[in-house]
Amino acid sequence: MKAELIQEFQMLQNSRANKFADELTDRFKSSVDLVTEKVNSSISMRGNMLLLLEKRLNFSLLKRFKNKFFKF
């Protein structure tokens, strides 16, 4: 009887430990996912801004070259 109670107590402790570990894992995973999403969105925004800047720069350079070399 005593061994059965000890075994039952150990099973209870293990189930609580597993539940606590699962909760911690979920918290860490959700916070890491949130940070990853923010980093990805900021990198994407930066990339879009750089592409727009390059597009404007290329257009203005082409316009200058056109005005300089192709005067009609």
Image (cartoon, rainbow, N blue to C red):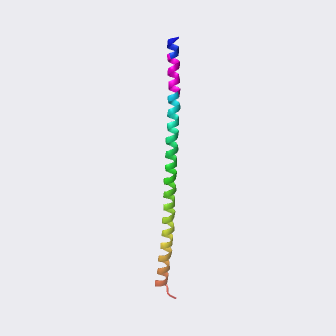
Q: Is residue 34 above or below residue 23?
A: below
> Looking at the picture, how far across and down is residue 29, in whole percent?
51, 42
Front in this rendered view, residue 15 or 66: 15
Q: Is residue 50 above or below residue 3?
A: below
As drawn, which residue projects farthest toward the bottom?
72
Q: Is residue 10 above or below residue 39?
A: above
How many numbered marks appear? Answer: 0
Residue at image x 49%, y 17%? 6
Q: Is residue 3 above or below residue 60?
A: above
As drawn, which residue projects farthest toward the top?
1
Front in this rendered view, residue 55 or 32: 32
Residue at image x 50%, y 25%? 13
Magenta stretch secondary structure, dominant: helix
> Looking at the picture, how far across and down is residue 52, in whole percent?
51, 68
> Looking at the picture, how far across and down is residue 50, in whole percent?
48, 65
Q: Is residue 11 magenta?
A: yes
> Looking at the picture, how far across and down is residue 40, in whole percent?
50, 54
Residue at image x 50%, y 72%? 56
Q: Which residues are magenta?
A: 6-15
